[in-house]
Amino acid sequence: MAIVVAGWAAASPLTLRYPRAVQKTGRFLIGWAKVLLEWRNPRATYPEKAISPFFWPNGSLPTSGEYANLRDSDFRDYTLRIDGLVEKPAVLSYDHLKAMSKQEQITQHYCIQGWSGVAKWGGVPMRDILALVRPLPQARWVVFYSFGSGTEGGLYYDAHKIKHMRHKLTLLAYEMNGEPLNVLHGAPLRLRNELELGFKMVKWIQAIEFVESFEHLGAGQGGYNEDHEFYGYRMPI
Ligand SMILES: Nc1nc2c(c(=O)[nH]1)N[C@H]1C(S)=C(S)[C@@H](COP(=O)(O)O)O[C@H]1N2
Ligand SMILES: [Mo]
């Protein structure tokens, strides 16, 4: 412990000064190992009795008038825009999404801060969305844009590997524990990608874009927390 604390104290002046370089060095040193970890499926589903009585919330709620109006009319007028590198861009209404075939799963959510929680999620599998919009061969990443901002301002977003969107547990969830998803946990729609950590599961989704690379978005690191908190863009559990 003493060695770890001493090493941390000695390195901090440098790591605080050059966080982006530390982020890139980390990716170089262990990024490949994280890719290997994505091959393993997490212990995916749990029984009803495992559902957590309290599920910790995280993130800043959207503050825009647009979001407030949608929320006040129970998301009746909500539409999800899906575009970018796809054959058939789409704008799907809340009713349309709920009329698509629903999938339910009980899974564990892991936040990088160290807490976790089990909940039942219900929604539209991303593979069905892919079948609808038909991504072009160049599409490698799928970017989820929120209605909400991150803690330091600027739109919250995150990019996901397209392969993960075909995973059987990747969901656009509109239900949590059998109830319509509440505002705190991401209404009307939030992502579940059970292969990744919590910060990648964008809440209050307003649009989805298929891209070849994410370098032109934000600070170019693949997501809000990757840009602002220097996290890696792949965070397998
Ligand atoms: N739009 C948006 N989505 C977000 C966040 C956020 O700040 N803004 N926080 C993320 C983090 S760090 C976690 S752990 C989960 C928390 O989901 P929960 O509030 O349903 O527990 O949401 C993720 N999605
Ligand atoms: Mo998190």
Image (cartoon, helix red, strand yellow):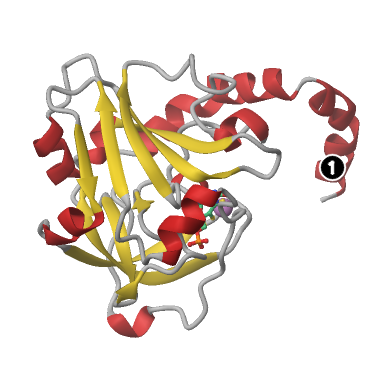
Quadrant assignment, res 98: bottom left
- Residue at 67% over, 38% down: 153
**Callout 1 crowding tier (Cα within 10 Å): few <14, some 14–19, many ≥20:** few
Which three-letter amino acid code belongs to the residue tagged 1?
A: Ile
Residue 108: percent from the left, percent from the top? 40, 64
**Above or below: residue 62 compared with residue 123:** above
How many numbered badges does the structure rendering display?
1
Residue 13: percent from the left, percent from the top? 89, 27
**Above or below: residue 96 compared with residue 49:** above
Quadrant assignment, res 175: bottom left
Residue 199 in view in this figure = yes
In terms of depth relative to the viewer, which is nearer, 220 or 44? 220
- Residue at 13% over, 22% down: 87
Residue 176: percent from the left, percent from the top? 35, 70
The residue at which mark 1 appears reads as: 3
Q: Is residue 44 left or right of residue 33?
A: left
Disc 1 CB within 8 Å of nearest ligand 2 atom: no
- Residue at 58% over, 63% down: 115
**Above or below: residue 77 compared with residue 210:** below
Q: Is residue 134 left or right of residue 156?
A: left
In terms of depth relative to the viewer, which is nearer, 80 or 195? 80
Q: Is residue 2 left or right of residue 188?
A: right
Residue 157: percent from the left, percent from the top? 48, 36
Tell me the SS state at disc 1: helix
Q: Is residue 197 left or right of residue 39?
A: right
- Residue at 78% over, 20% down: 18
Residue 40 in view in this figure = no
